[in-house]
Image (cartoon, rainbow, N blue to C red):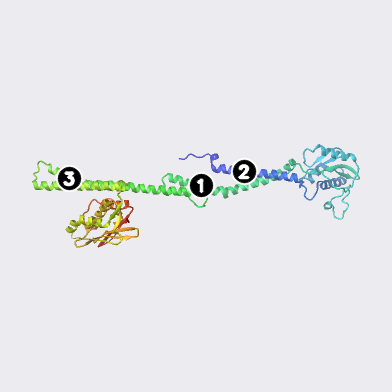
Amino acid sequence: MQPRQRWYKSLYWRIAIGFVVFLAAMLVVQAMLYTWVVARSGRTLPGQSPNGFAQTVAIDLANELERNPSADLDRFVHEQFAQVAHPFFVMLADGRVITSGAGQISEPLLRLAHARLLRRRPERIDRPESDRPAGDPAGGSATGSSAAFRGNRPIPIVVNGETVGVVVVPARAPFGFLLGRFAPTLTLVAAGVLIVGTILASVLIFGPARRRLRALESAAQRLGSGDLAARAPDRGGDEIAAVASAFNAMADDLSARAEALTASDRARRQLLADVSHELTTPVTAMRGYLETLTMPELAIDEATRGRYLAIISDETARLEHIIGDLLDLARLEGGGGSLALEPVSVVQLFDRVCARHERACQTARVTLSTSIAPGAESVRGDRDRLEQALQNLAANAIRYAPEGSTLRLSARRDHDAVAITVEDQGPGIPPEHLPHIFDRFYKAEASRAGHSGGSGLGLSIVKAIIERHQGRISVTSVPGHTTFEVILPFA
């Protein structure tokens, strides 16, 4: 059983954690950059300048003190201006300093505010046009000058003609103040974006990839456990699909090799059984007759003895023939032995086949005829091997040819090759036997009028010889007509 993988070693978790950390870092950098840009641009008071905002604060404080001289200005400032994203402070005549959350105030600003308080000269303060109530062009009860506003200018708070304090609004908000002011909002936004982004990434990015990799892993495990039909889904056209396609190709190759090995093992077992059977038959006959000849209590006349010895000789020859065919077939199929390739006359091949089987044809009362079409006079190959193949085909045809029939050998040009055919008028080969007649030790005598044949290796040897010549052999058969066609390279 495969050991359980620790979660922190998983590729999925590493990618997910890396993505989350990267996204969080980007959000933090974005928040810091936004705060810095706002601090540098001074745009924390949209539509107002710092001095204009200071005038608004001074008027509001003056109005509050006129209504309630004992008002808590500290509380009033924090309640009325809690949402303002720009720092300011108020210095009262009694020395108190009220800040809007600006933290530590710079010493130059404090000195500037204190110096303005020491002057104690009333000024009329005009509200900005945007801050004036309808029908109040003068701007309220506070007084002051309408001089041009300049940064960090202390604006007096005038109540009943007396300056009770000043308001100072820095031209630019300090970075630390803005960071503290925006931090809660930015944190909530960043957390929401991080959560939503992580969920979407998990569902849309990591989820499909994880499922497909899981399917690939499952297919690999099933293949490793012996399931040769296991395949991974290879749709998508991306890298995972490429890996799945490579895995499927490997699985197909392994499956084909396994099937080939199974078929080879089955063929090897069948071959051993066939060889054992074919060798056992003559050996058994020889042993029986030898045991009979060596029995002292059995009187055997010379004629019987001679007949027994002739049978033993025939079985010995048969055994040698089977062994020779097996060795010959092994050399041909294994690529052993060299072929002396040269132009070979088809006329000479046919003449030697006719001479070799002339006596057999006379005995079987079969006529042997030959014909060679123009352009098919020669082929390229090994003379002895090609003659061996044609001799086997002719012998096989004569064995099944009925009396009075004709055995035809013919050659014709077939594009860049020569087609040699061997035709007989025998009983034919049933269709179910045709795919197997070139197999070792395969015999179809039961379907061909009960004829006894050879070892069942002749056609296998013919096929091996033709394939060694880069040719091919085929057979067609119907009752009364069987044709073996051999395609050989043209010389």
Mark 3 residue type: Met
Question: What number is the disc on residue 201?
Answer: none
CA–CA distance between discs 1 and 2? 24 Å
Q: Are marks 1 and 2 in contact (CB under 8 Å)?
A: no
Q: Can residue 277 be seen?
A: no
Q: Which residue is mark 3?
A: 286
Mark 3, other Cα within 10 Å: few <14 / some 14–19 / many ≥20: many
Mark 2, other Cα within 10 Å: few <14 / some 14–19 / many ≥20: few
Mark 2 residue type: Phe
Q: How many numbered marks have been drawn onto this rendered protein structure?
A: 3
Which residue is drawn at the image coordinates 87% and 55% (left, top)?
135
Q: Secondary structure at mark 1?
A: helix
Single out the mark in the foreground, 1 or 3. 3
Mark 1 residue type: Leu
Single out the mark in the foreground, 3 or 2. 3
Q: Position of residue 47 (x, y in %)?
A: 79, 51
| First in residue order: circle 3 vs circle 2 | 2
Q: Position of residue 129 (x, y in %)?
A: 84, 52
Q: Secondary structure at mark 3?
A: helix
Q: Secondary structure at mark 2?
A: helix
CA–CA distance between discs 1 and 3? 68 Å
Q: Quadrant of residue 104?
A: top right
Q: Are marks 1 and 3 in contact (CB under 8 Å)?
A: no
| First in residue order: circle 1 vs circle 2 | 2
Q: Which residue is mark 2?
A: 22
Q: Are marks 3 and 2 in contact (CB under 8 Å)?
A: no
Question: What number is the disc on residue 213?
Answer: 1
Which residue is drawn at the image coordinates 77% and 39% (left, top)?
103
Mark 1, other Cα within 10 Å: few <14 / some 14–19 / many ≥20: some
Q: Can residue 358 be seen?
A: yes
Q: Position of residue 70 (x, y in %)?
A: 86, 42
Q: Nearer the viewer, residue 196 or 322?
A: 322
